Image (cartoon, rainbow, N blue to C red):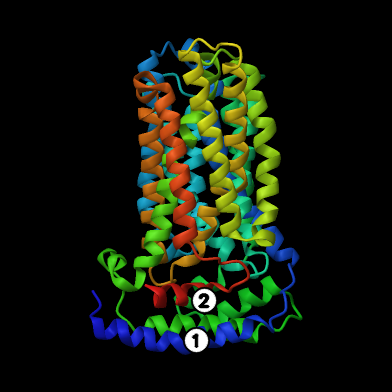
């Protein structure tokens, strides 16, 4: 652990850097978005698509797997939920892998687990092989959930970092939606084989994209850092200022001892950790996975067609995710988070009112309220709370603790996902209306959290954001 004197010395070292970075913001010109940045981002978000495919696979495959392999409902519940267990393990190790071997290597390592998992599922004849395949995919996407947004944030110019990093969530959404729609037309084995394709494309593409210049700087490979940065910014671009900022900030952190997990709870990282963990807790406990996993059941319980309602969700989710992605750098992170949370609060409240009216025998309006509520929740979540917590997570942690801190944040996210998805049916049985009023309250709390604690990171370099977070703690 660092002593108070070392913390004060670190703040003194960072103060001039933050000042220079802030002084330069007004005069900075927007860096061009090169073909290399675009191609590298496309290759990275193929991993996000794999993430979404894994999440979306279990719903359309359920009847086919249960019938063909003779599984009980408990057997299939284990198959569905074991993905989350694997993802938590993957999240725990993801930061160490990405910090030790690089962002590209972490993505490639993850995809190997995903590919083996899909193959095991596609050719499984027994429940245990099915579960091993699902667990393997879970480990892979747990690692990808760290490596993809971190890599994108570290390679993109500051003026487009938000929209490019938000592509992570958009591709997760696409993966879920495609699996859900295609899965209604083909067998579960063919669907699993289709899941292999984006993983293979990413593995091949990783050979042609540059490593993160900030990771290279962290390892002391300054020549490789500048080479990578030049490729990303263009052959004729002047990278001297950005390279100098990266080098100066990295060297200022190198003067201090290697950080341990316990150091994350020191004062200098307190603000960043609170924001990262807080956003993930509020994202999950706002009820998104309960609504996403059991939307059909919600519709049917409220007296509406589950199939029509689920299709309507996909129709709303995809375009709002796209809109949210492109508004991230135009409107800023904070306004979108506030609008998104207000929308999820309203959506949850309307669903709760639907069940309340159902209890009061007002059956005519109850199904419509349920549909409107779910669609408002889905659209609002997709435009902000779905992707922006991942964007902010990739921006706020200093490079020397980014692996440990982001791993902790992602573990919290997956743990919250498991708790909500596991307990949701029990909560509905206890009180349907109370469950959604609780979700509405958590969304209202999110608005206050964002307004009070979350900084605006739009248009700022990673070095400026991270240094200022240390000084604010």
Quarter of image, res 163 = bottom right
Left or right of 373 in this view: 432: left
Q: Where is residue 385 in the image (x, y as percent from the top left)?
A: 54, 47
> x and y percent of residue 303 in the render?
56, 12
N-terminal of the two: label 2 or label 1? 1
For residue 311, which quarter of the picture?
A: top right
Q: Is residue 104 left or right of residue 409?
A: right
Quadrant for the N terminus in the image: bottom left
- Residue in front for this viewpoint, 436 or 73: 436
Q: Name the residue under label 1.
A: 17
Classify mark 1: helix, strand or loop: helix
> Tag 2: Cα neighbours inside 10 Å, few (<14), some, or many (≥20)?
many
Residue at position x 52%, y 87% in the image: 19
Residue highlighted by disc 2: 463
Residue at point 69%, 46% (across, down): 322
- Residue at the image point whose x is 55% and y is 88% from the top: 20
Where is 186 relative to 221, above or below? above
Q: Give the mark count.
A: 2
**Is 461 drawn above or below residue 241 in the view shown?**
above
Contact? badges 2 and 1 (CB < 8 Å): yes
Disc on res. 244: none
Q: Quote the CA–CA distance across marks 2 and 1.
A: 9 Å
């Amino acid at each position: 652990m660092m002593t108070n004197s070392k913390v004060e010395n670190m703040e003194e070292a960072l103060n001039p850097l933050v000042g220079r970075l802030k002084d330069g913001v007004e005069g900075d010109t927007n860096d061009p978005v090169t073909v290399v940045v675009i191609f590298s981002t496309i290759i990275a978000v193929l991993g996000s698509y794999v993430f979404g495919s894994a999440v979306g696979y279990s719903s359309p495959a359920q009847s086919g797997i249960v019938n063909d392999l003779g599984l009980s409902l408990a057997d299939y519940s284990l198959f569905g939920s074991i993905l989350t267990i694997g993802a938590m393990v993957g999240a725990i190790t993801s930061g160490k892998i990405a910090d030790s071997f690089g962002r590209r290597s972490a993505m490639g390592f993850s995809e190997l687990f995903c590919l083996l998992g899909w193959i095991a599922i596609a050719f499984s004849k027994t429940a245990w092989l099915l579960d091993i395949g699902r667990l393997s995919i879970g480990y892979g996407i747990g690692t990808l959930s760290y490596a993809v947004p971190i890599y994108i944030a570290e390679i993109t110019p500051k003026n487009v970092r938000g929209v490019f990093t938000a592509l992570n969530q958009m591709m997760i959404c696409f993966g879920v939606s495609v699996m859900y729609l295609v899965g209604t037309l083909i067998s579960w084995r063919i669907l699993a084989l289709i899941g292999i394709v984006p993983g293979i494309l990413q593995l091949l593409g990783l050979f042609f994209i540059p490593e993160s210049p900030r990771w290279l700087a962290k390892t002391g490979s300054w020549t490789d850092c500048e080479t990578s940065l030049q490729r990303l910014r263009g052959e004729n671009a002047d990278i001297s200022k950005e390279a100098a900022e990266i080098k100066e900030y990295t060297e200022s952190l190198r003067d201090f001892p290697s950080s341990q997990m316990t150091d994350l709870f020191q004062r200098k990282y307190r603000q960043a950790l609170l924001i990262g963990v807080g956003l993930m807790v509020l994202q999950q406990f706002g009820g998104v996975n309960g609504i996403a996993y059991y939307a059909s059941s919600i519709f049917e319980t409220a007296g509406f067609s589950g199939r029509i309602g689920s299709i309507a969700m996909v129709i709303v989710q995809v375009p709002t995710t796209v809109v949210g992605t492109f508004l991230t750098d135009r409107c800023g992170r904070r306004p979108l988070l506030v609008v998104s949370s207000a929308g999820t609060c309203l959506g949850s409240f309307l669903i709760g009112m639907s069940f309340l009216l159902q209890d009061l025998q007002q059956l005519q309006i109850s199904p419509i309220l349920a549909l409107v509520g779910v669609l408002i929740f889905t659209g609002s979540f997709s435009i902000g709370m779905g992707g922006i917590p991942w964007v902010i997570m990739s921006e706020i942690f200093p490079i020397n603790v980014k692996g440990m801190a982001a791993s902790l944040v992602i573990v919290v996210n997956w743990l919250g996902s498991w708790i909500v998805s596991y307990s949701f049916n029990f909560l509905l049985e206890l009180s349907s209306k109370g469950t959604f009023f609780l979700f509405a309250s958590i969304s209202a709390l999110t608005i206050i959290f964002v307004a009070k604690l979350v900084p605006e990171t739009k248009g700022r370099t990673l070095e400026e954001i991270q240094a200022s977070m240390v000084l604010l703690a």
